[in-house]
Image (cartoon, rainbow, N blue to C red):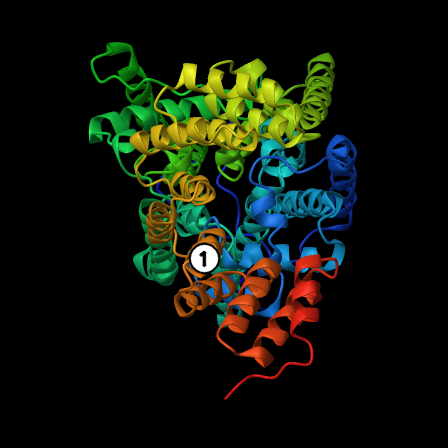
């Protein structure tokens, strides 16, 4: 008889055994399907709940910045798609996969907002399913509860109900998919899983570069699992992903600095001030997770004062929490891992890099869409372990409390989602929650002006200037209103005031050029058009109006160049095609002119001026 096999205890990793009452490091997970049958039932239920409680925004309209993503006809074509990938200045941020998705959606349902809203909700539902798969793969206690909280938490409404934030939901799907594949690679060490994870990681970066924190998040997970990190098995395989994330992050930082003009006094913070911003931002976001009250689209802008002692409590508190997590790691690595995941994923928006949003707020709900997973997972796991230890009525009370929590979160989400019904509702809700939000006052004024409610719009603009006197945009908007009323001198004064505040405002230069040209001051108008184009090279309207001004001086060759520049930036500008055709006629290039008039009419069949111009030159031929 052979010797009886001796039972061996599995080797301990990390040098510390964990008592049963703590968050245990998970066992090595098996290579199984994405979710089990029971898991899929839960996942489907969560998707249904997501669609149900986000129902108020199904028929919501466009809000701030959505038109820059949805209503961009010059990008909804094959040449436009090429520009999305090759020109970093053509979109509001260089997220080419996101804008490619918007092009595809536009091909499906045009400018109808419902399609974009339903897509965003569906992407959030898919992200919830993938988060559940990650939690189950890691054998996280309370995985169902964590996925449900992520699905229904009202702090995520901004990411789901706001069309512009499809970059959050889309990138989250790629991020969590990449995480799942890499976790599978970590077990099997098969190249195909690594390449699949890398592919999805690049897709996530091309949708939103905050996902560049994924390699760091994976290292946190591996440390939580094993208690230590191996350079060969853990760190080295992630090095290429770290480089990819850093490269895309540097591109975004450059874009914010140069294209989005995130520089100047509004962004001149010392390192100490940035540490104060970071500490307060982290606590603010965490606080909204545990107490999601008074959520608003734009939060008040903090006054960062390094001389105020109380502001140091935020970074010091964060440091103390990290130290506590480190101290209890022998008992449980879960708390420190959750803190590191949360803080690390938030790091790109903590204030160490300039962001456009810092002009009006240091925080936003959509900042923590992915980061919240760390705190949600820790809290859910702790609740599950406490429930497992409870019995009798205590267990029933605990289960009822979890259900009640989800019901409260779902109701809050429903209520918060209603704020995104349309732009006016959102701005009014923002002003109610943050009366000093000059951005909302100004944007509400623009909305009212579009409805010809000029007096009400003027009140909003002046309120914005009362709150923020160094705000150039309300002066531009007041100038537009005055110009429409025929008050040319008043409009010129407002545009000049705007340029005193912000000399690099392309809009102020352009609009000043318009009123000067209308007033017969062509030389001055041309100067301001050139300045607007210098600031924003793809400024279609400025190129077109500069061409008109040059054509008025019979400088047709130069005018043609400007019209062609306008069409290079927007090939679907019917006005630029028509104006180019008129300039070509004056140069004797009749056949080319006819072609331009035809293109103008293809874009806008009701364009009377182009049709009249076409009739006027019909039958003529280009001269020698």
**As rendered, which of 31 and 169 lies closer to the eye?**
169
Residue 456 in the image: state x and y as whole percent.
60, 18
Q: Nearer the viewer, residue 407 or 451?
A: 451
Can residue 33 be seen here? The reply is no
Q: Position of residue 167 (x, y in %)?
A: 55, 47
Does 241 appear above or below 147? below
For image coordinates 33% across by 59% down, the residue present is 243
- The quarter in which the N terminus is drawn is bottom right
Q: Position of residue 108 (x, y in %)?
A: 74, 58
> Where is 391 relative to 222, above or below?
above
- Residue drawn at point x = 55 percent, y = 31 percent: 376
- Left or right of 565, for residue 611: right
The front one of 156 and 419 is 419
The residue at 51%/61% (across/down) is: 84
Residue closest to the eye, 178 or 8: 178
Q: Picture coordinates of residue 88 (x, y %)?
A: 42, 58
Q: Which residue lies furthest to the bottom in this view?
A: 624
Q: In this view, does 516 lie to the left or right of 482?
A: left
Asked whether, in this view, residue 374 is left or right of residue 402, the answer is left
Q: In which quarter of the image is residue 505?
A: top left
- Asked whether residue 557 is in view, the answer is yes
Q: Is residue 545 above or below residue 44?
A: below
Q: Residues within 10 Å of mark 1 (few under 14, many from 20)?
A: few
Q: In this view, does 603 lie to the left or right of 296?
A: right
So how many labels did they put on this image? 1
Residue underneath mark 1: 552
SS of the residue under disc 1: helix
């Amino acid at each position: 008889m052979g010797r009886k096999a001796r039972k061996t205890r599995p080797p301990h990793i990390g040098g510390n055994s964990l008592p049963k009452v703590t968050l245990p490091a998970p066992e090595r997970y098996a290579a199984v399907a994405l979710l089990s049958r029971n898991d899929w039932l839960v996942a489907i239920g969560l998707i249904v709940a997501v669609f149900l409680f986000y129902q108020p925004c199904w028929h919501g309209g466009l809000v701030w910045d959505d038109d820059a993503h949805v209503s961009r006809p010059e990008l909804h074509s094959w040449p436009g798609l090429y520009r999305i990938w090759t020109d970093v200045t053509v979109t509001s941020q260089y997220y080419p996969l996101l804008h490619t998705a918007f092009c595809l959606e536009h091909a499906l349902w045009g400018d109808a907002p419902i399609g974009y809203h339903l897509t965003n909700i569906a992407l959030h539902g898919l992200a919830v399913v993938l988060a559940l798969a990650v939690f189950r793969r890691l054998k996280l206690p309370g995985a169902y509860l964590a996925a449900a909280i992520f699905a229904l938490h009202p702090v995520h409404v901004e990411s789901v109900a706001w069309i512009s934030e499809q970059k959050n939901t889309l990138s989250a799907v790629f991020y969590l998919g990449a995480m799942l594949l890499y976790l599978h690679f970590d077990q099997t060490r098969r190249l195909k899983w690594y390449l699949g994870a890398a592919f999805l990681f690049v897709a996530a970066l091309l949708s939103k570069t905050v996902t560049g924190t994924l390699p760091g998040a994976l290292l946190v997970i591996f440390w939580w699992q094993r208690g230590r990190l191996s350079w060969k098995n853990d760190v080295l395989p992630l090095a290429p992903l770290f480089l990819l994330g850093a490269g895309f992050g540097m591109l975004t930082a450059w874009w914010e600095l140069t294209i989005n003009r995130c520089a100047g006094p509004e962004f001149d913070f010392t390192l100490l001030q940035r540490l104060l911003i970071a500490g307060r931002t982290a606590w603010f976001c965490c606080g909204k997770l545990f107490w999601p009250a008074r959520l608003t689209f734009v939060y008040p802008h903090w006054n960062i004062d390094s001389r105020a002692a109380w502001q140091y409590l935020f970074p010091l508190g964060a440091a103390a929490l990290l130290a506590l997590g480190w101290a209890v790691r022998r008992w449980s690595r879960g708390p420190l891992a959750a803190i590191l995941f949360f803080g690390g994923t938030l790091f790109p928006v903590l204030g160490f890099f300039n962001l456009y949003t810092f002009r009006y707020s240091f925080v936003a709900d959509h900042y923590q869409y992915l980061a919240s997973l760390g705190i949600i997972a820790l809290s859910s796991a702790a609740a599950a372990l406490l429930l497992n230890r409870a019995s009798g009525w205590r267990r029933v009370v605990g289960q009822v409390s979890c259900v009640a929590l989800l019901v409260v979160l779902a109701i809050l989400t429903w209520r918060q989602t209603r704020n995104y019904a349309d732009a006016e509702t959102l701005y009014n809700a923002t002003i109610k929650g943050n009366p000093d939000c000059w951005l909302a006052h100004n944007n509400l004024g623009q909305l009212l002006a579009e409805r010809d409610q000029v007096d009400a719009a003027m009140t909003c603009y002046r309120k914005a200037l009362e709150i923020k006197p160094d705000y150039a945009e309300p002066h531009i908007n007041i100038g537009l209103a005055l110009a429409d009323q025929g008050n040319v001198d008043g409009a010129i004064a407002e545009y000049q005031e705007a340029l005193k505040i912000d000399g690099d405002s392309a809009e102020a230069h352009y609009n000043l050029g318009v009123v000067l040209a209308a007033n017969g001051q062509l030389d001055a108008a041309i100067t301001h058009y050139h300045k607007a184009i210098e600031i924003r090279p793809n400024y279609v309207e400025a190129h077109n109006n500069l061409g008109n001004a040059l054509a008025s001086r019979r400088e047709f060759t130069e005018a043609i160049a400007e019209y062609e520049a306008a069409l290079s930036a927007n090939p679907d500008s019917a006005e630029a095609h028509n104006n180019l055709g008129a300039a070509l006629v004056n140069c004797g290039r009749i056949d080319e002119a006819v072609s331009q008039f035809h293109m103008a009419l293809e874009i806008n069949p009701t364009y009377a001026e182009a049709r009249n111009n076409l009739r006027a030159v019909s039958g003529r031929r280009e001269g020698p």
